[in-house]
Amino acid sequence: MTFPPLHVLTALLSGWTWLHADKHNKYRARDQLDSSVVFSELEQVAIAVIERHRGVVTRNDLFQVIVEERGWTNVSLSLLLSSSPIFWKIEHALYALRCRPLDPHAFIEARSRRAMQLAKPDIHLPPDLSKPLRFDVTQSGSTEPINKRVVYIPSVLREHVSGYFRHASGSGPEIKVTDLQVRKLSGFASSIGIIPKQTFELVIDLANRTYDVAIKNEVAN
């Protein structure tokens, strides 16, 4: 990539009425830009999470708000972090905003949070995986059509729970678990009275390839 000659560049910039040049030849927008127009809704949510953590977040910090609280998919979060030019990947699973000073204390705190998140799985696996696994999941809060909504299982189960599972009594649909995402479960949970963002128990029987659910009273904020 090469820059045009200085006189061409000067003529070009002088024609951009929305751009202001100060006496040090530094440029900025003449009028303050409306963030709701410049950034997508998902970018705005991510920016708010990053600012809440003083400039540095873990991917899990973003996941908890964007996926678990707001109802977007994990795929949407991955696409956001890989394609949006406003996010800076400092190191694996640690992100900041570009063109912002990096607070070293916020960076250290984010590293510590990530270490704790990795060291403290959502559940403890039983020694005998032939017995049914019981763990809490959260009903989707997404506004997507019910057949497209997904529920997420704890990350510690990634290598153990995948594929298709039949409902234990046959009253529910067959669900599919892929990369922590459970498909068809959200619609069934809704049909038995589980509301968006409500916590419920999911029972997975790996030996018999079946599942069941139990309603709890907790609702995520």
Image (tube, rainbow, N blue to C red):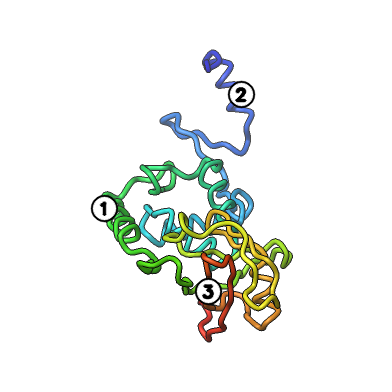
Amino acid at dot 3: Val
- Residue shown at 53% from the left, 37% from the top: 20
Query: Label 2 near label 3: C-beta < 8 Å?
Result: no
Badge 3 or badge 2: first in the primary sequence: 2
Mark 2 surroundings: few (<14), some (14-19) or many (≥20) residues within 10 A:
few
**Residue 10 at what x, y percent from top left?**
55, 21
In the image, what residue occupies the spot 43% across and 53% down? 59
Dot 3 and dot 1 residues touching (CB under 8 Å): no
Q: Name the outermost residue toward the bottom.
A: 217
Nearer the observer, disc 3 or disc 2? 3
Give the number of the disc on residue 187: none
Residue 205 on image: x %, y %: 53, 69
Q: How many marks?
A: 3
Which amino acid, mark 1?
Answer: Ile
Question: What residue lies at 49% left-to-right and 34% top-to-bottom?
Answer: 27
Name the residue tied to disc 1.
108
Q: Is residue 77 above or below residue 92?
A: below
Q: Residues within 10 Å of mark 3 (few under 14, many from 20)?
A: some
Between the residue at mark 2 and the residue at mark 1, the CA separation in whole angstroms equals 43 Å
Residue visible at 58% across and 78% down? 213
Q: Does 78 sit left or right of 118 as displayed?
A: right
Q: Is residue 217 left or right of residue 55?
A: right
Q: Is residue 124 visible?
A: no
Residue occupied by mark 3:
203
Q: What's the distance in space between the residues labelled 3 and 1, CA to CA?
A: 38 Å
Q: Position of residue 160 (x, y in %)?
A: 47, 58
Q: Which residue position holds label 2?
A: 12
- In terms of sequence position, does the residue under pointer 3 or pointer 1 come before the other? 1
Q: Residue furthest top?
A: 5
Q: Relative to 34, is 61 on the left or the right?
A: left
Of 151 and 109, nearer the camera is 151
